[in-house]
Image (cartoon, rainbow, N blue to C red):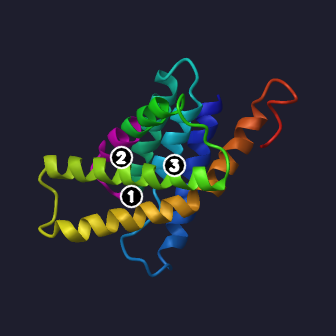
Amino acid sequence: MRIAAHVVLAYVLILFIGCLWRFVPLGRMTPDIVALSAVYLGLTARERLAPATAGAVVLGYLGDLLFGTPRGFLAVTAGIVCIFGQLIHRRLLVRGVVVTAAVSFVTGLVSGLIGLGLRAYADLIPARAGVEFGVIAGSAAITGILGPPLFRLFRALDARFGRTYRAREVN
């Protein structure tokens, strides 16, 4: 139930930011809400990774439908990013604004590079790769800025599903 709530919350955030982002003069540089949600699901998956990855893939598929990308593009990216979050969660404590922003920035970079690799595999990459790397870096920076408040929101949602008083506190 917790993972379904995260998928619904991230979907609402994608809709909200997608509507407002049209008025921001940054062109193709957008925050990667799907990747942030996927890495958070991977970071918080304890013993079982499959439900978190399935939630990330569903969210990626919903993102594909909203953004108009080829079906499966964001779904594969979100699944890989979720597994990436699971791989780093035992070695990294993601608390505090600076560490959360750094993890969000790296998540944006990883997601952008995975997306670039998938587009190259499907022969959908434009001729100017330098511009693509600039867009990936800009999107990663925006994702890094937006990461701490989103992680705080995700933690507050997790606190609603806590079984003990301590688990229900928002850190």
Segment tinted magenta in the rendering: 67-79
Task: State the CA–CA distance, disc 1 to disc 2.
Answer: 9 Å
Give the mark, 1 or 2, whose residue is nearer the N terminus: 1
Name the residue at 18% across, 65% down.
Answer: 129
Amino acid type assigned to the residue bearing label 2 in the image: Leu
Residue 12: tell me if it is visible. no
Residue pushed farthest top? 47
Q: Residue at x 47, y 56 (%)?
A: 105
Three-letter residue code for mark 3:
Val
Quarter of the N terminus within the rendering: top right
Is residue 131 within the magenta segment? no
Q: Is residue 79 visible?
A: yes
Q: Is residue 70 magenta?
A: yes
- Report which residue position mark 3 lands on: 103
Mark 3 and mark 2 lie on one chain; the one further toward the N terminus is 2
Mark 2 nearby-residue class (10 Å; few <14, some 14–19, many ≥20): many
Mark 2, residue position: 74
Sequence-first disc among 1 and 3: 1
- Label 1 element class: helix
Name the residue type under label 1: Phe
Q: Could you say which disc has been placed on residue 156 in the image?
A: none
Q: Tag 1: Cα neighbours inside 10 Å, few (<14), some, or many (≥20)?
A: few
The residue where tag 1 is placed is 67
Compared with 91, 27 (above or below) is below
The Cα atoms of the two marked residues, 1 and 3, are separated by 24 Å
Mark 1 and mark 2 residues within 8 Å of each other at the beta carbon: yes
List x then y, in percent, for residue 106.
44, 51
User: Which x, y percent locates residue 96?
Assistant: 67, 50
Q: Nearer the viewer, mark 1 or mark 3?
A: 3
